[in-house]
Amino acid sequence: MNLGTWVWVRPGALRAGWGDIHQLAMVTALGLPRCEVWLILDGAAHTARADLLVRTGTSSRRGEKPPAWTKWTVAEHLVHQQAGQPGPAAEEAAQLHLFGEPGTGPDQQVP
């Protein structure tokens, strides 16, 4: 999920009284539980619930079933992206001295 992605804002994602139809918007700031979107209806930025924002269109060719992720909400995309972030290294490099300061290799004496 990137900034500038077009999404459908489901009813209930904005404030009460915004009607019961989907609105087209562009994501301008990602976040959980709310994102900022630029609503095409009024040309203004609004905060909307990320779990009620759905990507527009599909990424499949005619006759093919679209991948499951095309139906994910923005919240699901953000959780998936966060889960894919690499954590801290589990083990230390065996030859760490190769990347250290000059003169600190195994054949160098450190005073």
Image (cartoon, rainbow, N blue to C red):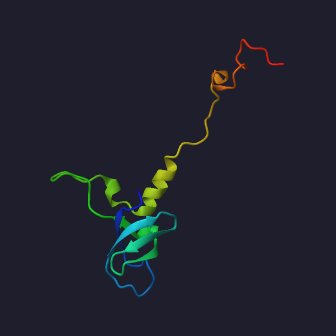
**Total tally of numbered discs in the picture:** 0
Please state, as top left, top right, bottom left or bottom right, where the C terminus lies in the image: top right
Residue 103 to residue 18: above or below: above
**Residue at 37% from the left image edge and 68% from the top image edge:** 26
Choose between 99 and 36: the one closer to the eye. Answer: 99
Residue 16 horizontal/vertical position (percent): 44, 85
Q: Looking at this view, is 6 or 10 the one in front? A: 6
* Residue at the farthest top position: 107
**Which of the image's four quarters has the N terminus?**
bottom left
Q: Position of residue 34 (x, y in %)?
A: 50, 69
Q: What's the residue at 43%, 57% (across, down)?
A: 77
Residue at the (35%, 55%) spot, across then down: 69
Q: Going by the image, does 110 lie left or right of 94?
A: right
Eyeballing the image, is 56 above or below 42? above
- The picture quadrant where one finds residue 73 is bottom left
Find residue 25 and report its horizontal and vertical position in percent.
35, 71
Give the residue displayed 42% in from the left and 71% down from the top: 37
In terms of image quadrants, where is residue 24? Answer: bottom left
Q: In the image as oriented, which residue stretches furthest toward the right?
A: 111
Q: Is residue 69 above or below residue 93?
A: below
Residue farthest toward the bottom in the current orientation of the protein: 17
- Left or right of 82? Residue 65 is left
Q: Position of residue 60 (x, y in %)?
A: 23, 52
Most distant residue in the left direction:
63
